[in-house]
């Protein structure tokens, strides 16, 4: 993983498929690209079998545009819908058993540090709400308590989408699903609070109906995880199949849910603020200048 | 046959806000061309759809109608499009892309 792996092997250029050539010549590797430039450069994500109009797909697409150094990034995933797309990108992807993702990412990020020292190599976990808050819960929490330096992203569609509609810990109370016909009896888990208690340096909620915000949140989370500690993003990424949302209303739903119960929230630890300001020039986290002393004369 | 998104160059090129490019769930599907539009005398370039990648969700239609308020995108049966952009005929440049339009339906 470096710019060396996103180039042609000598003599092979003319035999490579168009998509590959476009990726090498006009992909985001080694450049700074932003969400506002999409449509003008070749994105790393290729065609994949996720459902038409799925908000999770949109989020994954935006996240991959936002990775600060895509050529130095490895994604880690697990069973669930998201891996169907995450695995189809020009970014190495590691797939463990269901729920293993934060254990795998812990080992991976430590190994990369041993091998590459201070040169940043970013590890980003993207898994469903079932994978993160139910099956992988123990490994997720422990990786946070250990302050493992990688980013965990929950693709929260509030259901087990890939297996046809079972309730998860992140499903809302009362929600009726195909395989929860009596309605969920318990509250949605408060993973945000748990992330803070476990010591994450950055915790944010985001909804993909605001692409620039997705970009900003991903960048901060990945940068902070390089040195400061664990970072957690919880993204509302509706399942239009299990919640029967017409595909042309997916963004309307995202907006409604954002206003209703998924408002943007962001927690940045003091150490992370200082790091972002000093290392990456984030002006909003510079210490505020002491208030000017009023001139009494 | 199935529906795909079709962007009216004339309507888009009057505004060309690029919002739909950021909201399509599929990557490399709604692209932007500086030339398309300008070469027809409009002020800006235009967004366009690589129809072989479009999954027909119509999210872009909602975004153009409700967020951009420009109503430039319609869903059309793919065999009703005489010519459209296809991934094979798209060239990436420094800041924009160009497409040679071709019949999307073979045979
Ligand atoms: C150990 C194990 N148990 C069960 C499964 C079957 N399985 C595959 S995906 C999935 C649910 C995924 O739900 P979630 O993590 O919320 O992701 P989503 O599909 O909703 O994105 C299950 C139960 C599995 N792959 N491995
Ligand atoms: S089942 Fe739901 S979450 Fe999975 S790809 Fe389809 S719409 Fe998306
Ligand atoms: S949202 Fe509408 S006006 Fe804006 S770029 Fe897309 S088609 Fe053009
Ligand atoms: S219909 Fe859906 S997949 Fe097709 S271009 Fe529009 S947003 Fe993209």
Image (tube, coloured by chain):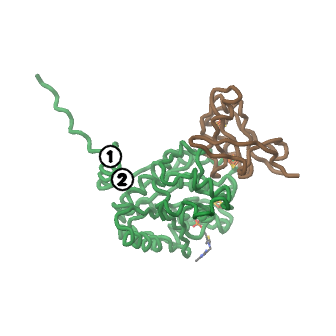
Chain colours: A green, B brown
Q: Are marks 1 and 2 in contact (CB under 8 Å)?
A: yes
Q: Residue furthest right?
A: B107
The verdict on label 1 being within 8 Å of ligand 1 is no
**Above/below status of B59 relative to A199:** above
**Residue A183 at least partly seen:** no
Q: Residue furthest top?
A: A297
* Mark closest to the chain's N terminus, 1 or 2: 2
* Residue closest to the far left: A297
Which sits in the foreground, A47 or A106? A47
Q: Between residues A279 and A283, which one lies in front from this camera angle?
A: A279
- Label drawn at residue B88: none
Q: Where does label 2 land, which residue?
A: A268
In the image, ligand 1 is in what quadrant? Answer: bottom right
- Which quadrant of the figure has residue A200? bottom left
Q: Which mark identifies residue A285? A: 1
SS type, badge 2: strand
Q: Residue at x 37, y 57 (%)?
A: A224
């Amino acid at each position: 993983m470096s710019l060396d792996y996103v180039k042609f092997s000598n003599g092979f250029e003319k035999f490579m498929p168009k998509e590959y050539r476009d990726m090498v010549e006009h992909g985001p590797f080694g450049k700074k690209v932003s969400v506002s430039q999409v449509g003008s450069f070749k994105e790393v994500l290729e065609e994949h079998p996720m459902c038409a109009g799925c908000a999770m797909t949109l989020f994954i697409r935006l996240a991959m545009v936002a990775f600060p150094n895509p050529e130095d990034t490895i994604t880690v995933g697990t069973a669930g819908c998201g891996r169907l797309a995450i695995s189809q990108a020009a970014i190495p992807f590691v797939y463990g058993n269901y729920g293993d993702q934060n254990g795998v990412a812990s080992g991976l990020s430590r190994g990369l540090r041993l091998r590459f020292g201070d040169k940043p190599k970013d590890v980003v976990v993207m898994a469903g709400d079932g994978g993160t808050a139910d099956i992988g819960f123990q490994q997720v929490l422990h990786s946070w308590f250990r302050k493992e330096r990688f980013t965990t992203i929950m693709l929260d569609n509030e259901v087990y989408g890939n297996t046809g509609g079972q309730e998860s810990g992140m499903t809302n109370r009362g929600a009726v699903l195909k395989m929860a016909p009596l309605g969920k009896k318990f509250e949605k888990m408060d993973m945000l609070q748990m992330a803070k208690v476990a010591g994450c340096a950055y915790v944010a909620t985001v909804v993909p109906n605001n692409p620039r915000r997705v970009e900003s949140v991903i960048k901060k989370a990945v940068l902070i995880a390089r040195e400061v500690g664990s970072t957690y993003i919880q993204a509302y990424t509706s399942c239009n199949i299990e919640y029967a949302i017409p595909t042309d209303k997916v963004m309307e739903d995202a907006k409604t849910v954002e206003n209703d119960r998924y408002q943007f929230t962001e927690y940045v630890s003091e150490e992370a603020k200082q790091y972002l300001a000093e290392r990456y020039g984030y002006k909003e986290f510079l210490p505020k200048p002491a208030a000017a002393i009023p001139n009494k004369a | 046959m199935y529906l795909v998104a079709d962007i009216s160059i004339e309507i888009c090129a009057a505004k060309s806000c690029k919002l739909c490019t950021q909201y399509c769930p599929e990557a490399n599907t709604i692209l932007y061309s500086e030339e398309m539009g300008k070469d027809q005398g409009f002020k800006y370039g235009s967004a366009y759809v690589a129809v072989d990648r479009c999954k027909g969700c119509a999210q872009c239609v909602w975004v153009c109608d409700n967020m951009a308020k420009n109503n430039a995108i319609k869903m059309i049966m793919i065999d009703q499009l005489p010519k459209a952009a296809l991934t094979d005929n798209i060239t990436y440049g420094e800041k924009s892309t160009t497409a040679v339009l071709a019949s999307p339906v073979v045979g």
